[in-house]
Amino acid sequence: MDREEALLRKRLIELSQMAFHKGIVIFSDFLNLNELHILHTTPKDLFYTEYETFGGYEMSERQIAAFLPDALCCASGYPITPLEILPNASKFAVGMSHRDYLGALVHLGIERGKIGDILVYEKSAVVFVKREMAAFITEQLTRIGRQSVRVKEQEKPEETYLPSCQLLTGTVASVRLDTVLAVAYPLSRSKIVPLIEGGRTFVNGKLILSNGFHLKEGDVISVRQLGRIVYEGELSVTKKGRHLIRIKKFG
């Protein structure tokens, strides 16, 4: 365990201890995939309370941990506010990337842990932030690059926030992590293997370092800097014994 991981684990345990002694729900900042992996692999007996995680919508990647004293739950009480970022002149607006939106937020001096997922659409985006940052961002974020923008809070059902996706099919020799990733992304095996062995691939929130990890129907695979896919299962087997599979790719 390196120093950074040890410090995060210690901090999460301290939050759990605080929730236990105060008898209230205590929240972390947004945790990235690697930080969530550290949370989920920390022995449960080190925590003083149970915990749950949520990021504002069902398919969220960055999530907040809620440490829960006995008999308490956190069904809808997470301090998360979705903000919609819109161009002021939509007629002349140009599409912007995830990096553009994130860069503008960080440029305001906001810590990364206060910002959750950013869902990018054709000419707008929705960003999930810690509630205490919502008013500041709404007032201060007026420009991204050369484009003038406005920000407003959203109060829509969780089901509204689903990233765009496409269904893909392909044949593989076996339903291994590396072969399924090759269907999702136009990358050679020589480029996919380093992604997995380099600690950038998570299945259902758990870090996977084995290329030959066998997937099950419904598994959610997240690859840092590339996105997420869901393995939807096997459709058929060809005469040559290859498996025709279907995946859902979010982007």
Image (cartoon, helix red, strand yellow):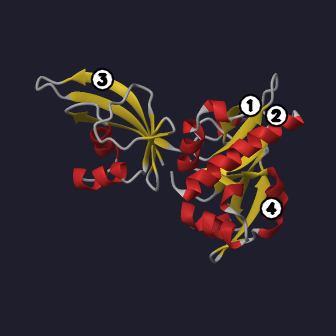
Look at mark 2 in the image and give the residue it sits on: 20
Residue 97: x and y in percent read: 54, 63
Residue neighbourhood size for the residue with mark 4, other residues' Cα within 10 Å, grouped as few (<14), some (14–19), many (≥20)? some
**Alpha carbon of mark 2 to alpha carbon of mark 4: how far?**
34 Å
Q: Choose top left, top right, bottom left or bottom right for residue 106.
A: bottom right
Instruction: Report helix, strand or loop for mark 4.
Output: helix
Earlier residue among tags 2 and 4: 2
Look at mark 4 in the image and give the residue it sits on: 138
**Alpha carbon of mark 3 to alpha carbon of mark 1: how far?**
42 Å
Residue 197: x and y in percent read: 34, 50
Look at mark 1 in the image and give the residue it sits on: 49
Instruction: Report helix, strand or loop for mark 1.
Output: loop
The mark found on residue 235 in the picture is 3
Residue neighbourhood size for the residue with mark 3, other residues' Cα within 10 Å, grouped as few (<14), some (14–19), many (≥20)? few
Earlier residue among tags 4 and 1: 1
Residue at (22%, 34%) from the top-left corner? Answer: 172
Residue 99: x and y in percent read: 55, 65
**Alpha carbon of mark 2 to alpha carbon of mark 1: how far?**
6 Å
Q: Choose top left, top right, bottom left or bottom right for residue 142.
A: bottom right
Earlier residue among tags 2 and 1: 2
